Image: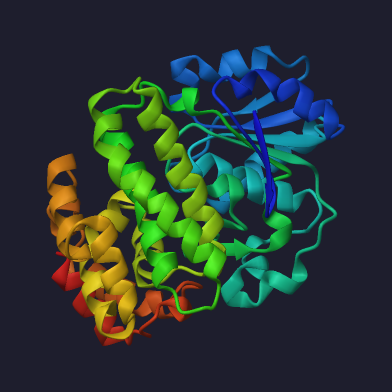
Amino acid sequence: MSTINYLTRIEFAEGAIARLPEFLAGLGVKRPLIATDAGLVATGLVAKVAGQLENAVVFAETPANPTEEAVIKAHALYVAEGCDGIVGLGGGSSLDLAKAVRLLTGHPGPLEQYTAVAGGVGRIHGNICPMIAVPTTSGTGSEVGRAAVIITADGRKLGIVSGFMLPSIALCDPELTWGLPPRLTAATGMDAISHCLETYMAPAFNPPAEAIALHGLDHGLRAIEPAMQDGRDADARRDMMICALEGAMAFQKGLGAVHALTHPLGAIRALNLHHGTLNAVLMPAVLRFNRAVIGTKWDVLADRMGGAPDQVIEDLNRRIGMPPGLTAMGVTDAMMEQVSHAALKDHCHGTNPRIATQEDYLALLRESA
C-alpha cells in the first residue's frame, strides 16, 4: 500500500477496496451514501462494496453526464436517510455527482452559483461532509480533481472548482478496472491521455505538474492497447490507473481548448456523448492549433511519443476504434455553431496556450468533423 499526500490523500494498491470500512471509520463516517450508476449495480460490484459496510445507502441513478436534477435527488436521499459521508463509486460521472452532493451538504442550491464561470470559487467552503472517491475506470481522474463537472439546471455543462472539492481520500484499486470492456477502456483511457497532453501544454508555470503529466502520458500510451486486448492484464490496468491519476494531479495547472469544446458538446442532451471519446476526436486538431505557440514542448512530446503528436494520436484513435469524427457521433453544423460560442465561456478556455476565438473554435470543430 502506498500512501501519497499530493493535493489529497491517495491510497493506491490492488485489493485496496477491502480497506474501505477502515478508511470510512477513520473519517468518522458511520452511514455513507454510495453514489454510483445502474450499470455498475448490474455488475454486482456495488452490492459487494456495500456488503462490506453496515449502514450504507445506495444512490444508483447517476446519468452518463451528471445533472443538477440527479444531484438534488441524491442529496435528498442523503438527508432523508441521515447519512454523514459519501462514497463516490464508478467512473467520472459518479465521482462528479458525489462531489456535487457533498457540496450541497454544506451549501444551499442552486449549483450554478458555485461554478467557476459564475465566480463561484470564493463561495465554496470546507464545512462539508467527508468523501471517499473510488474510481472503477481509468479516465477522468476525478478522484484527485478539484472540479465537479455538472449539467446545471439551465442546461450548461459547467465546472464547480475549488480545493475544498477534493475528496478526503482517493481509494485507487486497479483491480476494480479488470474486465472493463475494450471500448470503454479506450474511451476512458483517451480521456486520461488528453489530460496529460493538455495540462503539459497549458501556459501556467508549474514544473512539477508538467513532470507528472509527462510521466502519466508515458504510462497511458504504453498501456492503453494492452489493457484493451486483455482486460485482466494487471500491469496495463495499473499503468492506466496511474495515467488517469497523474493526468488529474497535473491538470490543477489548467486544461485547454479540447475541454472547452467537450464540455458544451457533452451537454447536448439529444446525443449524450462520452467525454473521453470527444477528447480523443478533438485532440489532433487542438494539438495542431497549439503547435505554433508551445515552442520546444512540441519537440518534447514528439520525442516521448515517437512522432508528431497530432499524427500519433490520430493513428492511435484509428487503432483503438475511436469514431472517425464528430459527424459520425451525430454532431450537426448547427450544434457546432452553438458549441463554438459556449466554449468561450468554459472555465478551460482561458488556460489554452493559444486563446481561441469563436471562429477558431468553429474551425476546430469542423476540422474534427
**Relative depth, front residue between 165 and 313:** 313
Horizontal side of residue 193 vs 30, given as left or right: left
Give 223 or 296, whichever is nearer the viewer. Answer: 296
Residue 56 visible to an observer of this rendering: no
Q: Position of residue 53 (x, y in %)?
A: 73, 17
Q: Residue at image x 14%, y 59%?
A: 327
At 80% from the left and 62% from the top, the residue drawn is 125
- The answer to whether any part of residue 110 appears in the image is yes
From what the image shows, is residue 42 above or below residue 174? above
Left or right for 142, reference 121: left
- Against 73, is 153 above or below? below
Total marks placed: 0
Of the 4 image quadrants, the one containing the C terminus is: bottom left
Q: Residue at x 18, y 49 (%)?
A: 317
Expressed as whole percent of the image width and height from the top left, the position of residue 211 reads 48, 61
Q: Tell me the residue at 22%/63% (across/down).
A: 309
Q: Quadrant of the N terminus?
A: top right
Q: Is residue 28 above or below residue 111?
A: above
Q: Is residue 203 left or right of residue 220?
A: right
Residue 188 lies, in percent from the top left, at 36, 43
